[in-house]
Image (cartoon, helix red, strand yellow):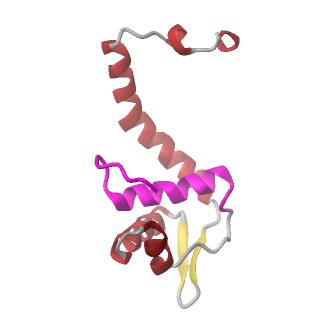
């Protein structure tokens, strides 16, 4: 995973897990990597991985079964979808629209003919 300098790494990791849930790669009830496994796989400090899991747990996307590990929560897809939509609409879309205005782009400039 390549990290963006404009967003904290732990949030990018949490977003990556949420994306796996949205894509169906992870499903409700699936066990996810341990904090150490995730840190090792991504090459980050386990404390960073733990912050990601804490955020996802607070959001209700994953839960911890003490001594067993972390799992995808029931309803996680809906929660992740809503959170990612909100983040996109509040943070990413305004930047995209601003850039489009600066470049004098209109929707018709990038929509395929079948979508117009």
Closer to us: 77 or 51: 51
Residue at left offset 37%, top offset 62%: 10
Q: In which quarter of the image is residue 42?
A: bottom left
Residue at left offset 66%, top offset 9%: 113
Q: In which quarter of the image is the C terminus?
A: top right
In the displayed structure, 17 sits above or below 43; it is above
In the displayed structure, 83 sits above or below 33; it is above
Residue at left offset 53%, top offset 59%: 17
Q: In this view, does 29 lie to the left or right of 102?
A: right
Closer to us: 46 or 41: 41
Q: Give the range drawn in magenta.
A: 1-26
Q: Does the magenta stretch include residue 70?
A: no
Residue at left offset 38%, top offset 17%: 100
Q: Is residue 17 magenta?
A: yes
Give the x, y percent position of residue 7: 31, 50
Give the x, y percent position of residue 112: 63, 14
In the displayed structure, 68 sits above or below 113; it is below
Name, please, the residue furthest toward the bottom.
67
Closer to us: 31 or 9: 9
Give the x, y percent position of residue 6: 29, 46
Count of picture labels: 0
């Amino acid at each position: 995973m390549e990290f963006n300098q404009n967003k904290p790494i732990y949030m990018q990791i949490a977003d990556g897990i949420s994306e796996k849930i949205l894509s169906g790669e992870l499903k409700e009830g699936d066990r996810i990597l341990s904090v150490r496994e995730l840190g090792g796989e991504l090459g980050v400090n386990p404390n960073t991985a733990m912050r990601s899991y804490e955020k996802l747990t607070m959001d209700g996307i994953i839960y911890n079964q003490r001594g067993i590990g972390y799992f995808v929560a029931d309803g996680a897809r809906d929660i992740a979808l809503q959170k990612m939509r909100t983040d996109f609409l509040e943070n990413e879309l305004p930047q995209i629209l601003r850039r489009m205005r600066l470049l004098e782009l209109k929707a018709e400039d990038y929509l395929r003919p079948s979508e117009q």
